[in-house]
Amino acid sequence: MQIDSHDVLIVIDVQNDFCPGGALAVPRGDEVIEPIRRIAPRFEHIVLTQDWHPAGHASFASAHPGKKPFESIELGYGAQTLWPDHCVQGTRGAEFHPELELTRAELVLRKGFRAQIDSYSAFFENDRVTPTGLAGYLRERGLSRVFLAGLAYDFCVGFSALDARKLGFEAFVVRDACRAIDLNSSAAAMEAQFAQAGVAVIETAEVLDAAARADAEEGVRQGLADAESGKIRPARQFFDAFEKSRIGHQ
Ligand code: VGL
Ligand code: ZN
């Protein structure tokens, strides 16, 4: 696998509320930051998503009297899990984790801003028909392979990967750069769907190995080009010159 200019790293929802101490903390959610920062330099293109709800959002248990977080209800578009209030627009909880520091990101895509519809996927809201605009953005820029990392593996990362496949993108989930909520075995259920949809599950090491190989190949190519243009002398030439000088001195 080679990472090239058609690839984009999409970092999903690495926000304070999904990290330890946050309103909807994903267990060990902050552990995604280090691997994401390690792979990020390998990508020419980076997109961040930001869960971005108005106060009183329909996915909040607090908006439904008598309901508690992690219960499920029926909304106009089907079943919806209810969550604690989280990622409310303009709050500290909705901000990116301060250590993420991906200042190179080219797009910050906000989702979940419609009061009556939740949006797990970065491509479609939970009614499964309202687009976020991301597919058009990627297509217009010629970005055809998406690499996904962040929070949560079994919700926003997972649904984004499945939708990417539906929309004709190649999709790779970088598993060790994600953490799961794992509500009612949702992580295993999501992995079964990955297999069906053709979502590849990979590890950061595979991204880094691919990039290291590409760097080494580029180094060799550059070395040969420099030798050919006379910019550097290949080792063989030095060796021959050395041998000659030795013979001359015998
Ligand atoms: C998410 C639940 C509610 C996520 C967002 O980012 O996975 N999960 N809102
Ligand atoms: Zn949310």
Image (tube, grey):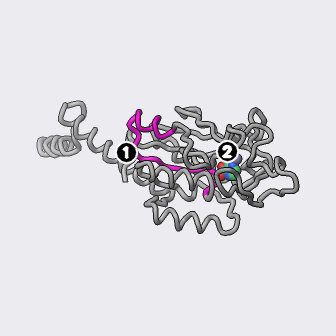
Quadrant where the N terminus is found in the figure: bottom left
The region drawn magenta spans: 134-153
Q: Is residue 52 left or right of residue 71?
A: left
Q: Residue 244 location, x and y as percent?
A: 13, 43
Nearest the eye: 192 or 40: 192
The label nearer to you, 2 versus 1, is: 2
Residue 30 visible, this orientation? no
Helix or strand or loop: what does disc 1 sit on? helix
Q: Residue at x 69, y 59 (%)?
A: 181
> Does the beta carbon at disc 1 come under 8 Å from ligand 1?
no
Q: Quadrant of residue 87?
A: top right
Q: Quadrant of residue 154?
A: bottom right
Q: Earlier in the sequence, mark 2 or mark 1?
A: 2
In the displayed image of the protein, which residue is found farthest to the right?
Answer: 66
The residue singled out by tag 1 in the image is 215
Q: Residue 74 location, x and y as percent?
A: 71, 56
The amino acid marked with disc number 2 is Ile
**How far apart are labels 2 and 1 at the CA level?**
44 Å
As drawn, 107 above or below 116: above
The residue singled out by tag 2 in the image is 117
Q: Residue 57 location, x and y as percent?
A: 76, 43
Q: CB atoms at circles 2 and 1 under 8 Å apart?
A: no
Q: Quadrant of residue 141?
A: top left
Q: Residue at x 76, y 39 (%)?
A: 88
Nearest the eye: 247 or 235: 235
Q: Residue 116 location, x and y as percent?
A: 71, 43
Q: Residue at x 50, y 59 (%)?
A: 203
